[in-house]
Image (cartoon, grey):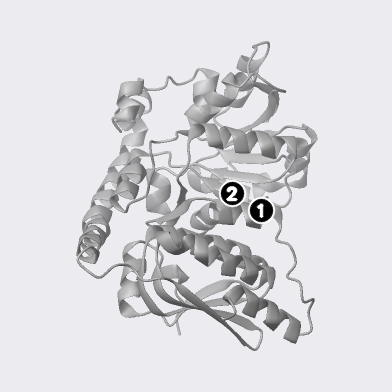
Amino acid sequence: MPSSAQKLLALGSAAGGDARLSPLPQEAEEDLSREVYGVFGIPVDATDLAAVTQQIQRAAKHRRAFLLSTPNTNFLIQSATRGLLRESLLKSNLCIADGMPIVVLGRMLGVPIRKRLAGADLFEALKLNVGGPPLKVFFFGGAPGVAERACKSLDGTATGIVCVGWHDPGFGDVEAISSDEIIDRINGSGADFLSVSLGAQKGQGWLLRNHDRLSIPIRVHLGATINFQSGQLKRSPAVLGNAGLEWLWRIKEEPYLWRRYWADGCKLIWLLLARALPLLAHKGMARLRPVEQELEMTVRREGALLVLGLSGSATRRNVAHAILSIRAAIAMRMPLAVDLSNVKSIDSRFIGLLLMLRKQANECGGMRLVNVPSRIRRILWLNGFAFLVHQG
C-alpha cells in the first residue's frame, strides 16, 4: 500500500507539477526537527543552554535569520488575548522557557523541560563563549541612557560578545520606531545579534513587524538583560531563580512591577484551576484506556486545498512517522486542512508538530484543523489552541 508521502507525490504529478517533491527550505527542515511542544497556547522547545548557543553561533556564521523568543509568565498570559504577541512566538525559530511557571505547567503536561532558560543566562553564556569570533551585538531600546551604558560595559572586555552599536528609539509606537532611518541604522551596524528591550508586547510586535526588513541574523527580545548589562539592575541570587522566586527580587529592584506580577499571578491561578488540572485529570484517565493506536495518514485534494486525514493517536510516539507525510505536504506548497475526525487522542508534542506545519503553511495559504471531534476540541481548548480549529 502506498504511503501518504507517495500519494502526495502522485497528487503533485497529476496536477501537472514536477514528479519530484521540491526540497524543503532549511528553515522548514529545522522546524520539523525541533522538539517543540504546545503549552497553553504557545510553542515551547525542550532544549538546553548549550544547544541554544550552538544554534545562535550557526545562524550568525551563515547570516541566517533566526528569531529567538524567551516566553515567560507574562508572555503566556498575554498571548491568550493578544494575537500579535502569540503570532510572534509561533513565527519564532526557537522558544525557550524563561519562566518557572511555564516549566512547571509544561512538566504537568509531560513536556521534558529540564530547567528554566532565562534570557539573561543565555546572554551570559554567549559572553563566556570565547573560543571563536565574538558575536557583534546591537542594543535597541531600554530606558534613556541604558543601551549606551550596556554597550560601553562590553568595550575592552575579553568576552564572546562585542557591542557595535545602540539606539534608544524613545516612546513611540511600533510603527513610529520602524522607520527606514532606524532600520537602516540597525542593519548598517553589521551586528550578528540584535538585543531588543521595548517591553514584551511592543518588542515582540516590533520584531514581527520588521522581520523581513532586518538583516541582522539573530533577533531576540531580552527585556531586563540590558538593565543587568548596564549595571542599572542587579540579578537575583541563583537560589531565588532556581526556586522560581526571582519575581520577589524583581519587585525589590523595580517596585512598580508588583501590579504586573499580581495580575499575572491571578490569571495563572485561573489557568491552573480551569485548564491545567482538567488536562491533568484527562491524562490520568487516558492511562486507564487501551494502548495508544498507530497513526495512519491519508491525503486527498479538494480543489486548491490539500487535506491530510489523521486516524489513531496523534501523540508523541507517532510524531516521527507523521513527519514523513508532513514534510511531503509542506513541499506541495498548497493551503492545508488537517482532518481530525478519526483522531482518538492528541498530546502537547503533536500539537507542537501541528504548530510547525502551520508556520510553514502560512507561506502558501495557511493551515486549519477541520472535523475536530468534541473530545479533541476540548483538549485543544483546555491547552489554549482553539484558534487552530476552523470555525464553520
Regarding residue 340, the answer to whether it shows in the image is: yes
Q: Quadrant of the N terminus?
A: bottom right
Which residue occupies the foreground of this view, 26 or 290? 290
Assign a secondary structure to mark 1: helix
- Residue 164, x across and y down, in percent: 72, 25
Q: Residue at x 38, y 45 (%)?
A: 112
Say whether marks 2 and 1 touch (CB < 8 Å). yes
Q: Which residue is mark 1?
A: 27
Q: Residue at x 41, y 59 (%)?
A: 316
Density class for disc 1 (Cα within 10 Å; few <14, some 14-19, many ≥20) is: some
- Residue 349, x across and y down, in percent: 42, 57
Which residue occupies the foreground of this view, 213 or 339? 339
The numbered dot on residue 57 is none
The numbered dot on residue 93 is 2
Vertical placement of residue 126 versus 303, above or below:
above
User: Residue 291 is drawn in which quadrant?
Assistant: bottom left
- Residue 346, x across and y down, in percent: 37, 67
- Say how many tags the image has: 2
Pointer 2 or 1: first along the chain: 1
Q: Quadrant of the C terminus?
A: bottom left
Vertical placement of residue 254 versus 35, above or below:
above
